[in-house]
Amino acid sequence: MQSPVSWALLGLVIERPSYAYELAQRFDRTYEGALSLSSTSHVYTALGTLTSRGLIEEVAGSRTGRQPKPRYRATAKGLEDYREWLVRQLAEDRRRQRLFVLQLAALTRDPEAALATLDRYEKACLQEAGGTPLNGANGVPADEASGLAARLLCEESRLAMGAKLEWTQYARAQLKSLASARALGR
Amino acid sequence: MTLLALEHVGKRYVDGPHERPLLNDVSLDLAPGELAAVWGLRRSGRSTLLRVAAGIERPDTGVVRFDGRDLVDHGEDVLGEGIGYVQKALRGAEAQSVLEEVMVCLLARGISRAAAHARACTALERTGSAQCAALAPRQLDKAESVRVALARTLVLSPRVLVVDEPVNGVDLHERDGILLLLRSLADEGVAVLASTGQSTGLSGADRALALSDGELRGSPSQQLAPVLALRRSA
């Protein structure tokens, strides 16, 4: 299963069994700015996929009342696959970062241009680092389990940005050496 | 309005025949209510930058101004009430208690003991370290010692607060509390300049800057400040 929307939806079902409409609302709230649904019907399609793969199932007896609507919960297989998928994301992050570095390396024919690009990249990292909210600030509860995802997200963003900033220092030193060597060779 | 301005500041580290540029044509301005944080690797010169900004060290070239006045001529006048400098940890704390330690600079300025006591208590309260008042400075943990060091500086009500490495060595669970304290001081109108060796210490800053090879990168001028302020209030 490749669709990030399906995996994200599975995460919501694992967190709390829900109806499709409720899931659509929780999806928008939880993944705002990170992932979006093309339409509400997107949820129904993804739920169909998750059900057919045995990752979620209808809660028995939830299709009752005048307007029966099924409530979904995760299966043991769904929970296990979700955990494995989360760990695989590390490789995906690594691939994306590797791609960026290789693309930057394409500019090394002109080290000055690469340095200018690096400066802009560093500036973007700094803005991101400064803009990351603090735990305990508005919208990021310092306690209670409900704020856990927000706290983990903050810390992950901050540490990831730190690694990028340190990398820019190394890359700049390397590019400056290259520029000096080329200047001497002329 | 700029309260603190570094204009084309240069500073070299000299150790016998060895010389190393620490600050190279660095410019930075800071307005009231603004929090700027400078990140850098070890030996990047971030502590030197802060000492120069506070008027404790003179720049080799360039000018540092507080409220328009050159610190070379007026440094001693403004240190304390104008610019409060908080060095790493609570160095030089020799008083028997934290309360005494915070009071001492007020007493040295001829303020009565009763008034100094009241102001010190307020400063300790403000920095969340009132419970440390009766302790000896050596009994404080790292986060408490940072809070008390801030109280010792805030007791003089500076308009600019220069804080060297406020979260260095501070427990992860205490770190954001200290950053939030700096943020709240800025929100009250104090101009805050802080340094950090960990990028996590940049969070909450209006302007996050990086110092390397003597160059200050990011947005050292206030051009982005209004945008960031709007974002913060949204």
Image (spheres, coloured by chain):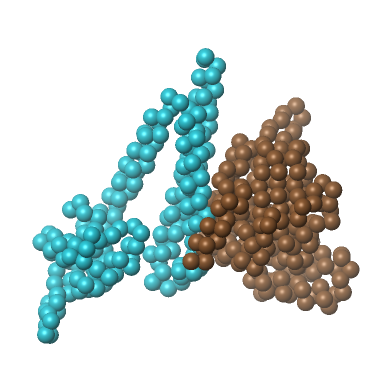
Coordinates of residue B29 in the picture (x, y in percent)? 66, 50
Residue in the foreground of this view, choosing between B121 and A43: A43
Q: Residue B37 at what x, y percent from top left?
A: 60, 53
Q: Quadrant of residue A104?
A: top left
Residue B225: x and y, percent? Answer: 57, 56
Is residue A80 in view?
no
Specify the quadrant of the image occupied by residue B123.
bottom right
Q: Tell me, yes or no, if residue B106 can be seen here.
A: yes
Q: Is residue B196 above or below residue A67?
A: above
For residue A122, above or below residue B69: above
In the visual, does A22 lie left or right of B78?
left
Query: Which residue appears at 72% of the width and 74% of the height?
Result: B122
Image quadrant in which you'd find residue B211: top right
Image quarter hosting the N terminus of chain B: bottom right
Q: How many marks?
A: 0
Q: Residue A142, image x and y in percent?
A: 48, 69
Residue drawn 85% across the image and 48% down it: B73
Shade of chain A as shown in the rendered figure: cyan
In the picture as drawn, the residue positioned furthest to the right comes out as B110
Q: In this view, does B107 lie above or below A162?
A: below
Front residue (pair A80, B230) = B230
Residue visible at 58% across and 51% down in the picture: B223
- Look at chain B in the picture and name its colour: brown
